[in-house]
Image (cartoon, rainbow, N blue to C red):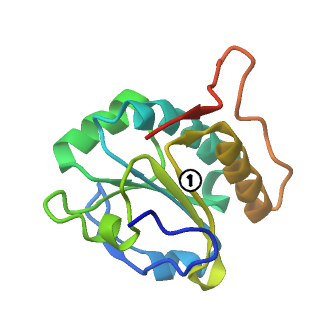
């Protein structure tokens, strides 16, 4: 089963954060759209993508909810967060059963969803697509009520596409 596509309803979920609190998608959506990025710490494409998601987070701050959803243990996820400089909240999907990953139909990571009001998926992106990350940036800027800020730098050499 492929990842849920744009236009579909995003399944609700509650997951623990790295800090031990609970994150509820339904509660977060009451404050605006949510960008949910699923990943595995050993995935080279996830390692490639997460610094760009961090740039989006830093560009719009707390005006836009970005959450990483790890398919790994808490210690391994903690090491990933440190190594790749992730400062947005990271949630833990049960690495034994992957209930949320399975509910979203994941077959590859990274997979990024932009979830709008009413739990409607606005964007679904599997692997690395520079065009999709640009679109995530545009949607984040709209949610923050600002113009899109550049997230790609001339010296990045960001690939157009990398499969997950």
Residue 8 place in picture, x, y as percent:
57, 78
Can you see residue 114?
A: yes
> Is residue 39 positioned above or below 105 on the image?
above
Residue 141 place in picture, x, y as percent:
77, 55
Viewed as shown, does residue 164 lie left or right of 117?
left
Q: Residue furthest top?
A: 155
> Is residue 55 positioned above or below 135 on the image?
above
Viewed as shown, does residue 75 lie left or right of 124?
left
Count residues near mark 1 (Cα–Cα under 10 Å), then give few for <14, some for 14-19, many for 20+.
many
Count up the numbered dots.
Answer: 1
Q: Residue furthest left?
A: 96
Residue 151 place in picture, x, y as percent:
70, 35
Q: Residue furthest right?
A: 147
Q: Classify residue 78 by image quadrant.
A: top left
> What residue sits 43% from the left and 54% below the top?
89
Residue placed under numbered mark 1 in the picture: 125
Q: Nearer the viewer, residue 3 or 9?
A: 3
**SS class, disc 1:** strand
> What residue sits 29% from the left and 55% below the top?
18
Viewed as shown, does residue 22 lie left or right of 32?
left
Viewed as shown, does residue 118 lie left or right of 134?
left
Q: Residue furthest front?
A: 1
Image quadrant in which the N terminus is located? bottom left
> What residue sits 75% from the left and 60% below the top?
144
Image quadrant in which the C terminus is located? top left
> What residue sits 79% from the left and 61% below the top?
142
Can you see residue 16?
A: no
């Amino acid at each position: 089963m492929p990842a849920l596509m744009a236009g579909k309803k995003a399944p609700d979920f509650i997951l623990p954060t790295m800090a031990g609190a609970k994150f509820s998608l339904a509660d977060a959506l009451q404050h605006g759209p949510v960008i949910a990025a699923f990943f595995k710490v050993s995935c080279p494409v996830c390692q490639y993508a997460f610094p760009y998601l961090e740039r989006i987070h830093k560009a719009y701050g707390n005006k836009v909810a970005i959450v990483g959803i790890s398919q790994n243990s808490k210690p391994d996820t903690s090491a990933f967060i440190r190594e790749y400089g992730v400062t947005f909240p990271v949630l833990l999907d049960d690495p034994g059963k992957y209930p949320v990953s399975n509910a979203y139909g994941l077959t590859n990571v990274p997979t990024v969803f932009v979830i709008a009001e009413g739990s409607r998926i606005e964007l679904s992106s599997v692997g690395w697509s520079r065009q999709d990350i640009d679109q995530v940036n545009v949607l984040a800027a709209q949610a923050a009520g600002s113009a899109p800020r550049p997230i790609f730098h001339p010296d990045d050499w960001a690939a157009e596409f990398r499969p997950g």
